[in-house]
Amino acid sequence: MQNIMNKKVLTKRRFLQALAASSFFPNLLMAQTTGYGIIRLVVPYGAGGPTDIVARLIATQLQILLKQTVVVENKPGAGSAIGARFVASSPNDGNTILIGNVSTFAIVPATTKNPGYDPIKSFVPIAQTSDVSSVMVTNSAFPAKTVQEFVTYARANPGKISYGSSGIGNSAHLLGELLQMRAQLNMVHIPYRSGAEMNLAVLSGQVQFAIMDLSASVAQIKDGKLKALALTGISRSNEFPQVPTMIESGFPDIVLRNWTGAAVAAGTPPAIVKKLENAFIEILKMPDYQNSIRKISGDAKPNTSEEFGNLILSDFKKWTEVAKQAGISLE
């Protein structure tokens, strides 16, 4: 009799377990393929910068498309590595999305010994969200008007030309080193604590040139305070059609596209990645979004997860090699 009672209890327990499983697993599957939970867009920089602006533009539309609450969280520090590490270690449910840029995905891991994440292995790319050129500028009094004139002047004045950046190992530093290597120049790198300090150094003549975000120098170029010698993107700017690219100036590999892009933690299910990819591409095609990106001197060119992944890999390899040749390695 006792055995019969035990079997009944066991049967009842298995029935309840099966019932619980039948209600749990469909909900889990639904969580992987439909709107579920709060989506966090993690920006590894402070509020107000180009990457933060992109994230907030996307958040507004993503909330409408996915019918989920979308919030932007700024997690600055370590050149953007803190925010990247946070997303890399987050649950791979697609609800925590990194909105980083070329520095986050390529330059920081190329120049840092242990950034705490791998740009290829730690993430699954979703889509590139913007593309912004940098620009090589001098102050208005500098004699050169073109890159070729600048190179001629620098070669005639070895060791007397200095260039600024907002820190060792960032994009401006790497581009300056790449120009130095390709043009066989002897120049001095002067790192500053911020882009604003670097900008003031160029304006005052403390350094002869710098390579900075186009969006940060538009007003001063238009006012004639800064002289734009060349853009580092792959095409000219609609805002300054008269300014050539570095490619057109005879330096085809001195290219830096200050792109931004979205990615989630490695291991995120393909169905979730595809859902996010489709939503991002739809946003990138919206005229309002494209017009907003143009206001920060950028372009919105929708691409696939695979295309964005190829861009990350290409830039990571490129800047790893440049950092190695220039001897740039940060702790």
Image: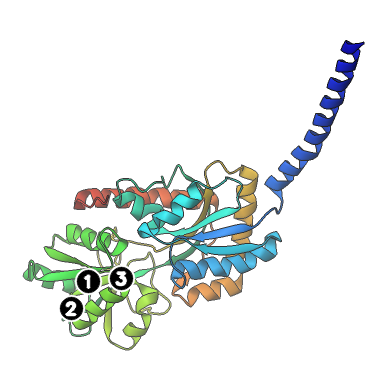
Is 123 above or below relative to 172? Answer: above
SS at mark 2 in the image: loop
What residue is disc 3 on? 194
Q: State the image coordinates of residue 102 (x, y, percent, origin top left).
A: 40, 58
Report whether 226 appears left or right of 98. left
Q: Residue furthest right?
A: 1
Closer to viewer: mark 2 or mark 3: 3
**Disc assigned to residue 88:** none
The N terminus lies in which quarter of the figure?
top right
Within 10 Å of the Cα at label 2, are there few (<14), some (14-19), or many (20+) other Cα atoms?
some
Q: Residue furthest front?
A: 2
| C-alpha distance separating marks 2 and 3 | 26 Å
Within 10 Å of the Cα at label 3, are there few (<14), some (14-19), or many (20+) other Cα atoms?
few
SS at mark 3 in the image: loop
**Disc assigned to residue 147:** 1
Answer whether labels 3 and 1 touch (C-beta < 8 Å).
no
Answer whether labels 2 and 1 touch (C-beta < 8 Å).
yes
What residue is disc 2 on? 144
